Amino acid sequence: KAFRYLSAIMNFAKADETAGGHRLITENPCDVIKDKKFKRTSPARKSYLNEGAISILLEYAYSIRMHPQAPQNGVTDQGINYVLLLLLTGLRKSEAMSMKWADVDHNRDVFVIHDTKNGIDHYIPISLDVKTLLYRQKIIAGSSEWVFPARYGQGHMTEPKSQLAKINKSVNLDFTLHDLR
């Protein structure tokens, strides 16, 4: 990844000219790696939650909802709803964060994600668990247009890192949001 970023920066600088019309640099030093045919790809992620980890996560999520005396350890209802939506639907983190209530069709039990990675609208059926989760989230979101509104100010939730860390600590697991896919 570092070479990819460095190469992009160097190509940008290579295209830049000074006031006199001269190029700042004429060659990209990262091209040596291309010329030597050095393999620059990074391995694809292979981590995921196994059945045992999913069971632990679901047990925790439902215990803090059903039993108010259960220790929440700083995990908010919106935080656990967000993680569960990713787990139950396979959405990418940005797709879930930017969901609007206008994209949820309760009559047809489907919601649509518009800004997908491949650029095609993605329709996802709403299961009973997801329907319950969305109902609970609507109570939290109130009049916001976003399913997962920002904690402060306008817009949608931006980065759930702290909630993920608190959930990981609470369930004694170490997973990423991508692992939920």
Image (cartoon, rainbow, N blue to C red):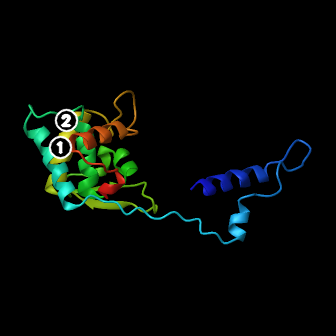
- Disc 2 packing (10 Å; few <14; some 14–19; many ≥20): few
Q: Is residue 91 visible?
A: no
In the image, 76 versus 149, the foreground residue is: 76
Does 164 sit above or below residue 106? above
Query: 67 left or right of 22?
Result: left
x then y, percent, for residue 61: 17, 44
Does 131 sit above or below residue 40? above
Disc 1 on helix, strand or loop?
helix
Disc 2 on helix, strand or loop?
helix
**Residue that extends furthest to the top in the rendered view of this protein:** 152
Mark 1 = which residue? 135
**Residue at figure coordinates x 61%, y 57% from the top left:** 4
Mark 2 = which residue? 139
Query: 80 left or right of 176?
Result: left
In the image, 170 versus 64, the foreground residue is: 170
In the image, 129 versus 29, the foreground residue is: 29
x then y, percent, for residue 78: 25, 38
Count of numbered badges drawn on the protein: 2
